[in-house]
Amino acid sequence: MSPHILLKQLEADEDIPYDLLLLADPSKEMVERYLAHSQLYIASQAGVTVGVVVLMAREDKGIEIKSIAVEPELQGRGIGQLLLQKAIEEARQKQYKSICIGTANSSVGQLYLYQKLGFEIEEIYKNFFVDHYPSPIFEKGIQAKHMLMLYMQL
Ligand code: ACO
Protein backbone atom coordinates (compact mmCIF):
# COMPACT_ATOMS: atom_id res chain seq x y z
CA MET A 1 0.00 0.00 0.00
CA SER A 2 1.31 3.47 -0.93
CA PRO A 3 0.04 6.12 1.50
CA HIS A 4 1.53 9.38 0.21
CA ILE A 5 -0.28 9.84 -3.06
CA LEU A 6 -1.12 13.39 -4.13
CA LEU A 7 -3.91 14.22 -6.54
CA LYS A 8 -3.33 17.49 -8.41
CA GLN A 9 -5.26 19.02 -11.28
CA LEU A 10 -3.29 19.15 -14.53
CA GLU A 11 -1.97 22.67 -15.26
CA ALA A 12 -2.56 24.27 -18.64
CA ASP A 13 1.14 24.01 -19.56
CA GLU A 14 1.47 20.32 -18.62
CA ASP A 15 1.24 17.46 -21.10
CA ILE A 16 -1.89 15.32 -21.16
CA PRO A 17 -0.84 11.79 -20.10
CA TYR A 18 -2.35 9.98 -23.09
CA ASP A 19 -0.36 6.81 -22.36
CA LEU A 20 -2.29 6.42 -19.09
CA LEU A 21 -5.64 7.57 -20.49
CA LEU A 22 -5.41 5.07 -23.35
CA LEU A 23 -5.00 2.23 -20.85
CA ALA A 24 -8.51 2.98 -19.60
CA ASP A 25 -10.04 3.69 -23.01
CA PRO A 26 -8.36 2.53 -26.23
CA SER A 27 -10.04 5.23 -28.34
CA LYS A 28 -8.17 8.55 -28.44
CA GLU A 29 -11.22 10.09 -30.07
CA MET A 30 -13.43 9.08 -27.11
CA VAL A 31 -10.77 10.31 -24.67
CA GLU A 32 -10.54 13.71 -26.36
CA ARG A 33 -14.31 14.02 -26.41
CA TYR A 34 -14.66 13.67 -22.61
CA LEU A 35 -11.47 15.62 -21.79
CA ALA A 36 -13.02 18.74 -23.25
CA HIS A 37 -15.64 18.70 -20.46
CA SER A 38 -13.67 17.18 -17.57
CA GLN A 39 -11.07 17.85 -14.90
CA LEU A 40 -7.94 15.77 -15.17
CA TYR A 41 -6.03 14.92 -11.98
CA ILE A 42 -2.50 13.56 -11.91
CA ALA A 43 -1.67 11.21 -9.06
CA SER A 44 1.92 11.37 -7.93
CA GLN A 45 4.09 9.78 -5.32
CA ALA A 46 7.35 11.45 -4.32
CA GLY A 47 7.10 13.63 -7.44
CA VAL A 48 6.62 10.69 -9.81
CA THR A 49 3.39 10.25 -11.78
CA VAL A 50 1.69 7.01 -10.76
CA GLY A 51 -1.76 7.43 -12.27
CA VAL A 52 -4.55 9.59 -13.55
CA VAL A 53 -8.18 10.31 -12.64
CA VAL A 54 -10.63 12.22 -14.83
CA LEU A 55 -13.83 13.62 -13.33
CA MET A 56 -16.78 15.11 -15.19
CA ALA A 57 -19.79 16.85 -13.65
CA ARG A 58 -23.14 15.49 -14.79
CA GLU A 59 -26.49 17.21 -15.25
CA ASP A 60 -28.03 15.05 -12.48
CA LYS A 61 -25.90 16.78 -9.76
CA GLY A 62 -23.58 13.81 -9.78
CA ILE A 63 -20.03 13.41 -10.95
CA GLU A 64 -18.62 10.70 -13.19
CA ILE A 65 -15.18 9.12 -13.08
CA LYS A 66 -14.55 9.15 -16.82
CA SER A 67 -11.12 7.58 -16.48
CA ILE A 68 -8.87 5.99 -13.91
CA ALA A 69 -5.53 4.39 -14.65
CA VAL A 70 -2.38 3.39 -12.81
CA GLU A 71 1.06 3.00 -14.42
CA PRO A 72 1.25 -0.65 -15.53
CA GLU A 73 4.33 -1.53 -13.45
CA LEU A 74 2.64 -0.12 -10.33
CA GLN A 75 -0.74 -1.84 -10.71
CA GLY A 76 -1.91 -4.31 -8.09
CA ARG A 77 -0.40 -2.43 -5.15
CA GLY A 78 -3.50 -0.64 -3.91
CA ILE A 79 -2.96 2.63 -5.81
CA GLY A 80 -6.14 2.27 -7.91
CA GLN A 81 -8.23 1.73 -4.79
CA LEU A 82 -6.62 4.78 -3.17
CA LEU A 83 -7.33 6.93 -6.25
CA LEU A 84 -10.97 5.86 -6.25
CA GLN A 85 -11.24 6.74 -2.57
CA LYS A 86 -9.69 10.15 -3.29
CA ALA A 87 -12.13 10.73 -6.16
CA ILE A 88 -15.05 9.86 -3.84
CA GLU A 89 -13.64 12.22 -1.17
CA GLU A 90 -13.26 15.03 -3.74
CA ALA A 91 -16.85 14.52 -4.95
CA ARG A 92 -18.16 14.63 -1.35
CA GLN A 93 -16.20 17.80 -0.60
CA LYS A 94 -17.61 19.45 -3.71
CA GLN A 95 -21.11 18.45 -2.56
CA TYR A 96 -21.99 16.22 -5.49
CA LYS A 97 -24.95 13.97 -4.72
CA SER A 98 -23.56 10.86 -6.37
CA ILE A 99 -20.52 9.49 -8.10
CA CYS A 100 -20.58 7.00 -10.94
CA ILE A 101 -18.22 5.04 -13.12
CA GLY A 102 -18.77 3.06 -16.30
CA THR A 103 -16.94 -0.02 -17.40
CA ALA A 104 -17.27 -2.90 -19.83
CA ASN A 105 -18.93 -6.23 -19.04
CA SER A 106 -15.53 -7.78 -19.77
CA SER A 107 -13.60 -5.68 -17.21
CA VAL A 108 -14.07 -8.25 -14.46
CA GLY A 109 -11.26 -7.02 -12.16
CA GLN A 110 -12.47 -3.43 -12.39
CA LEU A 111 -16.07 -4.50 -11.66
CA TYR A 112 -14.79 -6.35 -8.61
CA LEU A 113 -12.86 -3.29 -7.39
CA TYR A 114 -15.69 -0.80 -7.91
CA GLN A 115 -18.29 -3.01 -6.19
CA LYS A 116 -15.88 -3.75 -3.34
CA LEU A 117 -15.70 0.02 -2.72
CA GLY A 118 -19.49 0.32 -2.66
CA PHE A 119 -20.47 1.22 -6.24
CA GLU A 120 -23.62 -0.56 -7.44
CA ILE A 121 -24.54 -1.49 -10.99
CA GLU A 122 -27.60 0.55 -11.96
CA GLU A 123 -27.59 0.86 -15.75
CA ILE A 124 -26.47 -1.14 -18.74
CA TYR A 125 -25.91 0.46 -22.14
CA LYS A 126 -26.36 -2.54 -24.36
CA ASN A 127 -23.79 -2.93 -27.17
CA PHE A 128 -22.08 0.38 -26.33
CA PHE A 129 -18.63 -0.96 -27.23
CA VAL A 130 -19.88 -2.73 -30.35
CA ASP A 131 -21.59 0.42 -31.63
CA HIS A 132 -18.99 3.07 -30.68
CA TYR A 133 -15.61 1.41 -31.27
CA PRO A 134 -14.12 0.62 -34.69
CA SER A 135 -13.00 -2.94 -33.90
CA PRO A 136 -14.00 -5.59 -31.35
CA ILE A 137 -12.36 -5.40 -27.92
CA PHE A 138 -11.66 -8.58 -25.95
CA GLU A 139 -10.44 -8.94 -22.36
CA LYS A 140 -9.33 -12.40 -21.25
CA GLY A 141 -11.53 -14.00 -23.92
CA ILE A 142 -14.66 -11.98 -23.10
CA GLN A 143 -15.91 -9.48 -25.68
CA ALA A 144 -16.49 -5.97 -24.37
CA LYS A 145 -20.04 -5.40 -25.56
CA HIS A 146 -22.03 -3.55 -22.91
CA MET A 147 -21.24 -0.54 -20.73
CA LEU A 148 -22.17 -1.10 -17.09
CA MET A 149 -22.75 2.08 -15.06
CA LEU A 150 -22.09 1.83 -11.33
CA TYR A 151 -23.26 4.46 -8.85
CA MET A 152 -22.60 5.46 -5.26
CA GLN A 153 -24.86 7.93 -3.44
CA LEU A 154 -22.82 10.46 -1.42
N1 ACO B 1 -7.91 -7.42 -12.70
C1 ACO B 1 -8.06 -8.13 -11.55
N2 ACO B 1 -8.16 -7.57 -10.33
C2 ACO B 1 -8.07 -6.24 -10.27
C3 ACO B 1 -7.89 -5.43 -11.40
C4 ACO B 1 -7.81 -6.07 -12.66
N3 ACO B 1 -7.66 -5.37 -13.80
N4 ACO B 1 -7.85 -4.14 -11.02
C5 ACO B 1 -7.99 -4.15 -9.68
N5 ACO B 1 -8.13 -5.41 -9.23
C6 ACO B 1 -8.32 -5.82 -7.84
C7 ACO B 1 -6.97 -6.11 -7.18
O1 ACO B 1 -6.62 -7.46 -7.31
C8 ACO B 1 -7.25 -5.73 -5.74
O2 ACO B 1 -7.92 -6.80 -5.06
P1 ACO B 1 -7.79 -7.00 -3.47
O3 ACO B 1 -8.25 -5.71 -2.83
O4 ACO B 1 -8.68 -8.16 -3.20
O5 ACO B 1 -6.35 -7.25 -3.22
C9 ACO B 1 -8.23 -4.57 -5.85
O6 ACO B 1 -8.87 -4.73 -7.12
C10 ACO B 1 -7.55 -3.22 -5.73
O7 ACO B 1 -6.54 -3.17 -6.68
P2 ACO B 1 -5.48 -2.00 -6.79
O8 ACO B 1 -4.12 -2.55 -6.58
O9 ACO B 1 -5.89 -0.86 -5.93
O10 ACO B 1 -5.70 -1.63 -8.30
P3 ACO B 1 -4.64 -0.96 -9.31
O11 ACO B 1 -3.70 -0.07 -8.59
O12 ACO B 1 -4.09 -1.98 -10.20
O13 ACO B 1 -5.63 -0.02 -10.14
C11 ACO B 1 -6.86 -0.01 -12.19
C12 ACO B 1 -6.78 -0.54 -10.75
C13 ACO B 1 -6.97 1.51 -12.14
C14 ACO B 1 -8.10 -0.59 -12.85
C15 ACO B 1 -5.54 -0.42 -12.90
O14 ACO B 1 -5.44 -1.82 -12.92
C16 ACO B 1 -5.43 0.10 -14.32
O15 ACO B 1 -4.92 1.20 -14.55
N6 ACO B 1 -5.89 -0.69 -15.32
C17 ACO B 1 -5.83 -0.28 -16.72
C18 ACO B 1 -6.78 0.87 -17.01
C19 ACO B 1 -8.22 0.53 -16.64
O16 ACO B 1 -8.71 -0.56 -16.91
N7 ACO B 1 -8.92 1.52 -16.03
C20 ACO B 1 -10.34 1.41 -15.69
C21 ACO B 1 -11.18 1.53 -16.91
S1 ACO B 1 -12.84 2.07 -16.56
C22 ACO B 1 -12.66 3.76 -16.40
O17 ACO B 1 -11.59 4.29 -16.53
C23 ACO B 1 -13.89 4.56 -16.10
Image (spheres, rainbow, N blue to C red):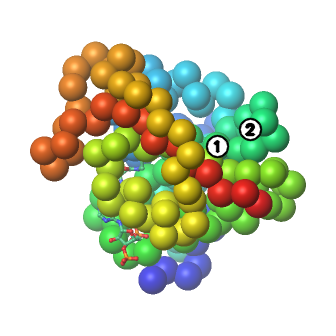
Expressed as whole percent of the image width and height from the top left, the position of residue 115 reads: 49, 63
Residue at 52%, 50% in the rendered image: 121
Position of 5 relative to 134 (above/below): below
Verify CB contact (< 8 Å) between mark 2 and mark 1: yes
Q: Residue at x 57, y 59 (%)?
A: 119
Q: Is residue 65 left or right of residue 61?
A: left
Look at label 1 and name its amino acid: Glu
Q: Which corner quadrant of the image does residue 146 belong to?
A: top left
| Residue 52 x/y as whole percent | 52, 52
Residue at which label 1 appears: 64
Name the foreground residue: 15 vs 39: 39
Sequence-earlier tag: 2 or 1: 2
**SS assignment at label 2:** strand
Indicate the amino acid at tag 2.
Ala
Residue 57 got which mark? 2
Which sits in the foreground, 85 or 113? 113
User: What crowding class fits label 1: few (fewer than 14 Cα within 10 Å), some (14-19), or many (20 or more)?
Assistant: many
Q: Is residue 35 left or right of residue 22?
A: right
Q: Residue at x 47, y 30 (%)?
A: 125
Is residue 49 visible to the viewer in this orientation of the structure? no
Q: Is mark 1 within 8 Å of ligand 1?
A: no
User: Would you identify the image quadrant in which residue 118 lies?
Assistant: bottom right
Horizontal and vertical percent position of residue 112 = 39, 63
Can residue 104 be seen here? yes
CB of mark 2 near ligand 1 (< 8 Å): no
Residue 153, position as x, y percentages in the image? 72, 57
| Left or right, residue 77 beside residue 52 | left
Q: Which of the image's four quarters has the N terminus?
A: bottom left
Measured along the vertical axis of the image, is residue 55 above or below residue 90? above
Secondary structure beneath disc 1? strand
Determine the CA span between mark 2 and mark 1: 6 Å
